[in-house]
Amino acid sequence: MLPTATAYFCTFAHLFAQADKLFFRIKMDQLQSLDRSKLPAHIAIIMDGNGRWAKDRGQDRVYGHYEGVVSVREIVNACGEIGIQYLTLYAFSAENWNRPKAEVDALMELLVNTIRKEAEELKKNNVKLHVIGDFASLPEVCQKELNEAKDITSMNTGLNLILALSYSSRQEIVMAAKKIGEGIAKGEIKAEDVTEASFHNYLYTAPFPDPELMIRTSGEYRISNYLLYQLAYAELYFTNVHWPDFRKPNLIEALLNYQQRERRFGKTSEQIQTTNPQHV
Ligand code: FPP
């Protein structure tokens, strides 16, 4: 006969193992119910709620950012496995420079350390790193680490991971307008040749298709100066889950929700159903 404490421990361990198997099965079922022909090529995420997540646990905001990196790793791996081609993460906005210096410093240090630690892993997992935003405004050590990671992963052909850093969509649009204006002044561009497609070429995101799905965590219903031009026809998905709790099952839930949407691009439902009957 086992001593009581050991018996309880064994029973709990057994129950946990069973629950774990059950959750794994549910996750696998969810994964299998994804329609592979209806995946977004590009997902953009606003990773919000790190501070509140930490506060709920009586911790400093920075603790939330550290835990947020765990979610970043899991979501990057999940996107690679599922076959998403582009993932843009809003890691630091131009407006975030206005946060308390200690938090900004901690975020920059976290970024440097994470990139340094993960670059080889990204390479191994066939992830290609890109950065959008005001690169020159980042601390030199940050720029150096990012440039190295971009070099290391430059030959990869799988997921394109795009980090939005010191990023402001309005600044990006103004910058594009300025470049076009300069081109016109120099006689290199004709005003009548400026189109929606050519305008796209002046944005940071020129090499990438527009996101079809934008996810924002933490229960806020805002775009916060993020990819304003590029999100014109994106499906928006908001969840109350704070970023440090947002993991693979949450991503699959967002994708399943996306797959139920009818993307009409201004047309009628009937028109969409006639041209795309398999997507009804
Ligand atoms: C928003 O939460 C989050 C940020 C401003 C930073 C996001 C950064 C990370 C997840 C870690 C670094 C990322 C990489 C790619 C290494 P918040 O602080 O605004 O949360 P709150 O709204 O609850 O205050």
Image: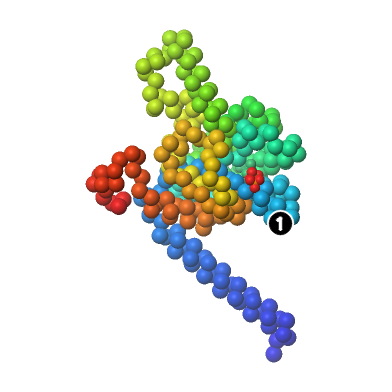
Q: Quadrant of residue 189?
A: top left
Percent x, y of residue 177: 49, 21
Furthest-top residue in this view: 186
How packed is label 1: few (under 14 Cα within 10 Å), some, or many (20 or more)?
A: few
Compare residues 65 and 15 and report the one nearer the observer: 65
Residue 262 located left or right of residue 27? left
Viewer can see residue 161: no
The location of residue 63, given as percent across then percent down, is 71, 50
Residue pushed farthest left? 274
Residue 215, placed above or below residue 149: below
Residue at screen point 57% across, 31% down: 168
* Ligand 1 within 8 Å, label 1 CB: no
| Rendered-image quadrant of the N terminus | bottom right
Q: Is residue 180 above or below residue 109?
A: above
Q: Residue furthest bottom?
A: 1
Residue drawn at 43 percent across, 25 percent down:
199
Q: Residue at x 47, y 24 (%)?
A: 202
Tell me which image quadrant ligand 1 sits in. Answer: top right
User: What residue did someone put label 1 on?
Assistant: 57
> Residue at the spot x=52%, y=65% of the render?
24
> Residue 21 or 45: which is nearer the viewer?
45
In the image shown, does 265 or 84 lie closer to the viewer?
265
The amino acid at mark 1 is Arg
User: Is the residue 62 above or below the residue 247 in the image?
Assistant: above
Name the spot of residue 269 as percent of width and height, x first: 29, 46
Q: How is the image coloured?
A: rainbow
